[in-house]
Amino acid sequence: MLALALLNARQTGPGESTLAVQTSEKTSARKRLTADRARRTSKADQVYSEIKEAILSGALAPGGAIDKLALCAKLGVSRFPVTAAINRLAFERLVVIEPQHGSFVAKIAANDVREWMMIRRALEAEIASEATRGLPGDTHREIERNLRYQQAAAEAGDVAGFYTLDVEFHKLIVDGLALRHAREILDGLRSHLERVRRIALSPPGRLPTACAEHKRIYDAIVARDAAGAGGAMRAHLDETTATFERIAEQNPDNFIG
Amino acid sequence: MLALALLNARQTGPGESTLAVQTSEKTSARKRLTADRARRTSKADQVYSEIKEAILSGALAPGGAIDKLALCAKLGVSRFPVTAAINRLAFERLVVIEPQHGSFVAKIAANDVREWMMIRRALEAEIASEATRGLPGDTHREIERNLRYQQAAAEAGDVAGFYTLDVEFHKLIVDGLALRHAREILDGLRSHLERVRRIALSPPGRLPTACAEHKRIYDAIVARDAAGAGGAMRAHLDETTATFERIAEQNPDNFIG
DNA sequence: CTCTAGCGTCTGGCATGCTAGCACTGGCGC
DNA sequence: GCGCCAGTGCTAGCATGCCAGACGCTAGAG
């Protein structure tokens, strides 16, 4: 009813074809409080997570075809959730859809890795600088705990454990500043980089170095040295980039470009 | 029920729970050459573009509900493409889906604007620095042409025309470096910021200033002054951020938070 | 023996009917 | 007159059937 009114109102222009199909805002705003309901996980969400995990873990190899029907059978759902999930994955470039042909796990190009790392470097350096303006007390405590664990993992040569702590360290800073969008972008980048990392874990010798780099970043943040924090983050991620380059060099088959 | 299905699907091996439903890579790789076919635009793509344009132009107001069925009727398609399109828009946070309730155009929070601009600043400053390592000759020519037009638009007080050139200027640099992913991220940010800009165009007095800032950035790139280019870009985007802040201040109704 | 044309099969894209769950509202009880 | 509750009308989510396009194989012609 109201939608119609809006439609008619907007049809003032002759060739003007607008999409203003929209109802009143009041109805939704009124009960917005109720809308904080827990985000129900739909089947599509679950399928999405499953496939993404499979891609990141390497169970679905880069360049490989994805058999939708087999997935449906395996997960016991219809094609709809699977299609929706794959569309989402295509949107974040983890999957490539070739119309009327098939869906494939995206390949990894060495150039893409460099670009992802450049973006990460720019963003995380900025964030590190920003963090010198103050982080919540909880975040400080968590980072300090994280750094102690890193030290322990590095000394024990626990590469996998260290990696988890490494990821957590970077996320703690972003979350401490409550940067939702930056967090999402960085998570997306990490999804892609994660696939590279799976090909070859960092050499164990890198652990103590990385740990020291993390400490240097955090110390600069505590000292409220914006330039120093940004610089330390840049240096750290440049080292990480070098590691990736080495992985690509030693595993040329897994990369294109 | 679904949980059970997923659980069963996961019980493929003892510890090994994989989704490796994947056919040989060879079949797809063999005729990959043929796969360069032009990216056909599906109905879902078209619907996506239509709705996005409507949101960015403000025809669909922030917070407003989206009537899917009316959209179907209006565009002459079934619900499927519309659903797919809205899912994609929800993924880029232009639309919020409340399960079993409705789909709504995302509201704009002042905090989000600040964060988007922070991300833009970090990325574009990095890119400006990177550009000092060399841009293609074509890009140089196009940027110089663009800057001349900017000058003309600024002198004529053509705010809309200047904005188009402004966007083009920033894109030219990114494209000159062939940074696909950074380009996509920045486009996504610009989608959101575009909605803010629609609320109030920049004051005409800002045009000559912005034009001068653009020139300063380009001059530093030509002079291969990495720090200068990055700094000039930061200064330019800080000014832009201040403009946004002023818009938000003068139009509090359009923002939340 | 090679090249090509045609057909079969597989894929994603789309339409449509159905289900479950939320919000609003009118009627009933208190 | 006020508040609770069930009915109703909406929504998104899901299942399924059908269609069109693209690849691959094979048979037939040169």
Image (spheres, coloured by chain):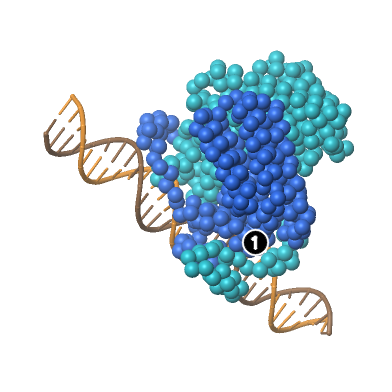
Chain colours: A cyan, B blue, C orange, D brown
Quadrant in the picture for residue B28: top left
Please tell me which residue lies in front, B200 or B95. Answer: B200
Q: Which residue is drawn at 57% across and 26% down?
A: B134
Neighbor class of circle 1 (other Cα within 10 Å; few <14, some 14-19, many 20+) is many
> Amino acid under label 1?
Ala
**Residue B188's spot in the image, x, y percent?**
61, 45
Observer-nearest of B249 and A38: B249
For the C terminus of chain B, which image quadrant? bottom right
Drawn side of residue B60 relative to residue A253, left or right: right
Q: Mark 1 points at which residue?
A: B61
Q: Is residue C22 above or below residue B137?
A: below
Apparent side of residue A180 relative to residue B83 in the rendered image (left or right): right
Tell me if residue A21 can be seen.
yes
Q: Is residue B16 left or right of residue A160?
A: left
Residue B40 in picture, x, y percent from top left:
42, 47
User: Can you give x and y, in whole percent of width and height, for residue A194 in the image?
Assistant: 62, 30
- Name the chain under label 1: B
